[in-house]
Structures are given as structure tokens and as C-alpha cells.
Image: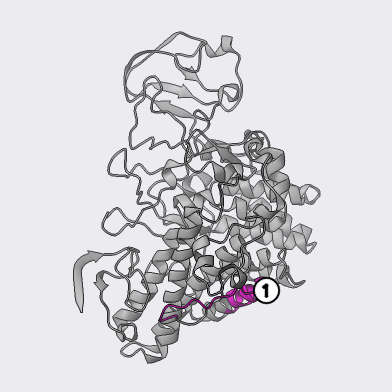
Amino acid sequence: MKKLAIKFNIWAKSSALILGISMMASCSGFLDEDVVSQIGNDYLTTPKGLNDGVNAAYSTMRAWYGTERGNNLTIFGTDTYTNGADGSWKFMNFYTNQFDSQNGHIRELWDEFYRGINTCNAVIDRSADVTGVSQEVVLQRISEAKFIRAHHYFIMVQLFGGIDLQLSETSVPTKEVTRASVASVYAAIIKDLEEAIPNLEAKAKSSDYGRATRPAAEHLLGRVYLTKATSEAGEASDYSKAEAALQSVINNYGLALLPDFGDVHAFGNEINDEVIWSTQYTRDPLTNGGGNNAHVFFLMEYDVQPGMIRDTENGRPFKRYKVTDYTLNTIFADRENDSRYSKSFVSVFLSNRPGTYNTTFDKSKETVTFAQGDTTMWLPGYNIPASERAKYPYQVLTPELYTERLFPPMKKHMDPGRADRTQFAGGRDYIAFRLADTYLMLAESQFRQGKMAAATENINVVRRRAAFPGKEAAMEIPESDLTFEFITEERERELLGEQSRWLDLKRWGILVQRVKLYNPQAAANIQDFHELRPIPQNQIDRAEGTSSAFPQNPGY
């Protein structure tokens, strides 16, 4: 066997195990591992092989969280975000026929998740032969593998509907695949999570930070039941089962909402009391894979404006996602009591290129002059007459001046810790599950059961935290204000840009309706069949019997 002497302590990619188990990895805070290639058939039954196999499976989470594909598949084509000026992938917002079975994001996610699933299958299948490690550790690693497998199948069934359900290791290539029913996929997901929960660490954070814990699995299980409830596999008991799992997360592990909403995504604070589970990245280019790329997509074109030049602090602005008018005027209508608009978006830019310049978008004045650190742009979030804008010694970007290049930039994912201003592979952990989402899902499950008092209180827990100081009472809502529409809005006030909106709209059955109402660029083309994504063509082509054995989703 050959070992490459590369040390790392994060979820890093490495060479594949020879039986199709891909990407050896280790996790931040848990383990320093050598990257290993050309591994023998019995490697997974050793203590190190068991760990490496599970860590390899964890690394496939990086195919989804913080990536271009994960964001494009969840942010684009919704009611809250449309496209900015960036020319890449706009068709995924427009829902044109360019979004077809040849889509690279679809193919990459499909292949990477199935590699992860097969790695989990191998770990689980071979665990009975592991020697040299306690049964407690073996059970925990099996449970982590089941958590990962459940997660991958859950994302896939939401995107694609019924898919190939593989629950044992595939050690040689095969073309015998079929599309399982949605109900059977959900049954497998729930079974994995329910079997995993007892053997995962019953604490807010794993002793080896980055591993799945019991609250992470319960949070995921709650979301699974909440989503299943409105699917073709839905059952009457789904909401009560979601409620039980989510309530346990809140009650039993010492997790807590941070006092300040703005601190949740603050740079350098990625490990905090609200985080239930995150996908880990690193600053080491050897072990970071493609990195966390979310930092580039939500930013406006600040870097060609007077007094400004691109830097690491303000970010690399792709101008990919632009908030819709609905987001600005409805979701964030209350900016007097609710801090989440001001703490989600950049409102001020400070000069990093001093000098005198002609104005670009704010023609209420002809020129502007800046010293280092002076305000160059202010985004108040509301319109101001030109006569008033003229009084400011900088440009004022108001909603009537927004374009596909200039709009409020979201700051949740900004990464000033990058090595330089061009770096695409960011190193921040991506917060995948957090407690505010648990509260909101719990409230939704209770609302669906008619438990209005409990649902309202759980919504108010989140809203009180979001209040400006002294505005907590004003942020509380009475039971009479808790409607389905309010829930759809409250989730986005809290979770905007956190890879949940498309999946939420789809599970609520309102994707097409809401996009037609609030996303003008997408309204003309979106159809009912867009509630599923296309099966990648390479999957259909490599199936025995091709499309007759593995049919494409309707409309593609």
C-alpha cells in the first residue's frame, strides 16, 4: 500500500478506496489523518479504516453546502432571489429549456452523493468485521454513516422524486438500477435516522467537533417528517412525529439562540451555541476541496464604484443573486422593530481607494471625494429624493436605483479570511442546521396540528431574539396573526440565503405560484413539472435498459 504524507484535520478529499468508496477525509477537531490511496480490501475493518471511511462520507457533504451547485439549486428560481448581472447559470433562475438533463450541477451532485452513499454502505456492511476498537465506537461510526446516508437521500428525493435506493455496498460496477417509490425512499431515510439517534453523542457538540450528534439527527428527522407530510408519501402522523423530534432538540442538549441575530453568521463565530451541525471547510488549499464558495454569490458590484476597489474585506462580487422586490418590501417590511434586515445586508461601504471621482449611479451630485475610510456608498433601503441625496458627500443607492449590478448585498457568508481578493475557495464552515430553524419547524408542525398557542410562542422565541433592543414586545405576534403565509415569510426573514427556500416552496406546494407572483425573470417559463429537477442524462444512459428502466422526470 502507498501513503501520501499529507497531514490534515478537516473534511479533506483524497484518493478513492479501490472498491469505489471515494474520498478519504478527516474532520476539523476530530483526527489528524494521512491521505491514503491504493487501499486493500480489508482496510475498512481496521480502526483507522473505519474512521477514514466515515470521514470520507462526511466530505461528500461539500457537494451541497456552500457550493455553487447547492446554492443555485436552492436560491435561484424562488420568490425571494432572482438573478443579478452574472451571466453564469441564469437559466436556472429563468427555468428555460437550457435547464435540462445535461446540467452539470445535477450530474455532479448525483454522482457525488451516490459516492457518499456507497461509502456509507461499505462502512455499515463491513462494520461487523472491525477489530481493535470498542463496540461503542463502532456503533457511533455506523450511526454517523446512517446519518449521512439519510441526509443524502433526503436531499435527492426532494430534488428528483423516486431514485435508486441502494442500502448495501456496490463493490463492482452494475447497470441494474431502478427508481424506487418516494414512499420507500422516505421509509429508508427515517429508518436510518431512528436507528442512528440512540448511538450518536447526546450533546450539543461532538467531542470531535464536526461529527453528527443526536440533536443533529433529530433536527434532520424533524425536517424529514415535516417534508414527507406534504409529499405523496405523507401520513397523518407526520406532523406529530416532527414535533417530537424537534422539541427534543430544543429541550435536551443545552443549545441556545444567540442573543444577537447578527452574531450567528459573524465571521470567526462559526462555532457557537446555536449551531447544531455544520459542514466544515479549512484554509489549507491541499485539503479544502473546492471550498465554501457562498461568499461570492450574494454581493453587488461595489468594486468599480468611486472610491472602491475589490478587497478581501468586501468580497469578490459575482453579482449572482439579487433580492426580489417581494423580499425587500414584504419579507423585510418591518425595519423599525426587526433587526434582521440591517444585520443581513451591507448598508455602508468605506473607501479603500481615496480620490476624487465622477459619480456613477447617484447623479444628485457630479463628483465625490474620499479619504481612506470615508463612506463611499450608503444603502438606506428606502427611496430618498434627489434633492436630499445631494446633501450627502457620497453616493446614496436607493431602491429606485437598484439594477442587476447594484443591490443590497447579503453579508451572512462573507469571508474576509481568504488569502487574497480573487480566492474562490473560501474556508468558513457552512452552518447547515441551527436552532432558530428548529424553532420555526417546530412552530410549523404545531400550526399544522392546530396547536396555535404553542406554535405562536415558538415563533415569538425567534422573533424576540431578532428584535432591536427594547423592541421585543413589539416583535411578538398574537395567535390571530399566525397564518401559513406568516410562517412562509418568517422562515425567510430568518433563513434568507441559507439554502432552504426552493426546498421550502416545493414542500409547501407553492413553488410555481410564488415564482409567478414575485420573480418576474422566472414567471414566464416556470411550469408544474419544475417542482422536480431533471435526472442527469449520464445516469439514464448507464442504466440497463436506459430510459425504460430509469425514466426521466416529466417535462425534461
Q: Please tell me in which quadrant of the rendered image residue 144 appears.
A: bottom left
Left or right for 68, reference 340: left
Residue 6: image x %, image y %?
Answer: 21, 65
Q: Name the residue under label 1.
A: 183
Is residue 554 on the magenta stretch? no
Residue 388 appears at what percent x and percent y?
A: 57, 12
Describe the colour scheme in one phrase: one colour
Part of the protein shown in magenta: 170-191
Mark 1 falls on what kind of element? helix
Pinpoint residue 474: horizontal percent, then vertical percent. Answer: 69, 40
Residue at the spot 70% in from the left edge and 45% down from the top edge: 514
- Please report the residue visible at 67 percent of the width from the left and 64 percent of the height from the top: 226
Height in image: 541 above or below 196? above
Residue at image x 31%, y 44%? 418
- 99 relative to 381, above or below: below
Q: Is residue 21 above or below residue 45?
A: above
Viewer-side residue, 192 vs 78:
78
- 395 vs 164, nearest the viewer: 164
Binning the other alpha carbons within 10 Å of mark 1 as few (below 14), some (14 to 19) or many (20 upward) gives some
Q: Position of residue 25 (x, y in %)?
A: 33, 68
**Quadrant showing the C terminus:** bottom right
Q: Give the residue type that dot 1 points to.
A: Ala
